[in-house]
Image (tube, rainbow, N blue to C red):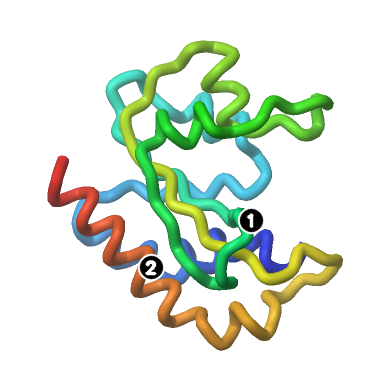
Amino acid sequence: MMDDGIAIAVLENISNKLQSIGIEVVIGETDFQFCFHHLKEDDFGIILDAAYIGTVAGSVHSCKLEEAIAAYGETNAHHDMSIFDLMKLYSKPLKGYFIGIEIAKAEFGCELSEDLKKKFNGICLEVEKIIYEIVMEV
């Protein structure tokens, strides 16, 4: 769905740098159940995903994970579930952050929109910077 894959593209681009400083990178794509079961109670996690909150395409936002989970809307169908739903359902406490990358288009297609392609390197740098800042404060 075009820009819905921005987090995967960014992680694939910066994963070697993150791993070199000891950060385990798990790219779950749509398999949120695998990601959920991969988490341990004492883990500190950073979830990176596409977001649509109505800001400028390519902008990067972060917040504490518990804030993101609390703000996340309830789903109406099983296929709409997410890792946040599982965390709520099973009351799995996890310390960490959510980083959202604002999308431009969520349409059928296998490539990022032109807006995000143009901003891709800057998005990667911004995500990397936020992750480094988070790691430094932990």
Q: Residue 93 in the image: x percent, y percent?
A: 39, 18
The residue that appears at 49% across and 68% down in the rendered structure is: 59
Q: Secondary structure at mark 1?
A: loop
Q: Which residue is mark 1?
A: 52
Residue at the spot x=81%, y=25% of the render?
A: 76
**Residue 54 sits in quarter:** bottom right
Dot 1: within a 10 Å radius of its alpha carbon, few (fewer than 14), some, or many (20 or more) residues?
some
Q: Is residue 38 left or right of residue 72?
A: left
Residue 62, label in figure: none
Provide the secondary structure element on which disc 2 rests: helix
Tell me the mark number nearer the camera, choosing from 1 and 2: 1
**Which residue reaches farthest front?**
54
Residue 17 percent coordinates (x, y):
29, 66
Q: Is residue 20 left or right of residue 73?
A: left
In the rendered image, the vertical position of residue 78 relative to residue 56, given as above or below: above
- State which tag comes first along the sequence, 1 or 2: 2
Disc 1 to disc 2, C-alpha distance: 22 Å
Which quadrant of the rendered structure holds the N terminus? bottom right
Task: Report the residue at 60% width, 54% height from top.
Answer: 53
Residue 14 is tagged as 2
Disc 2 residue type (three-letter): Ile
Q: Image check: 44 left or right of 31?
A: left
Q: Amino acid at mark 1?
A: Tyr
2 up-or-down from 115: above or below? above
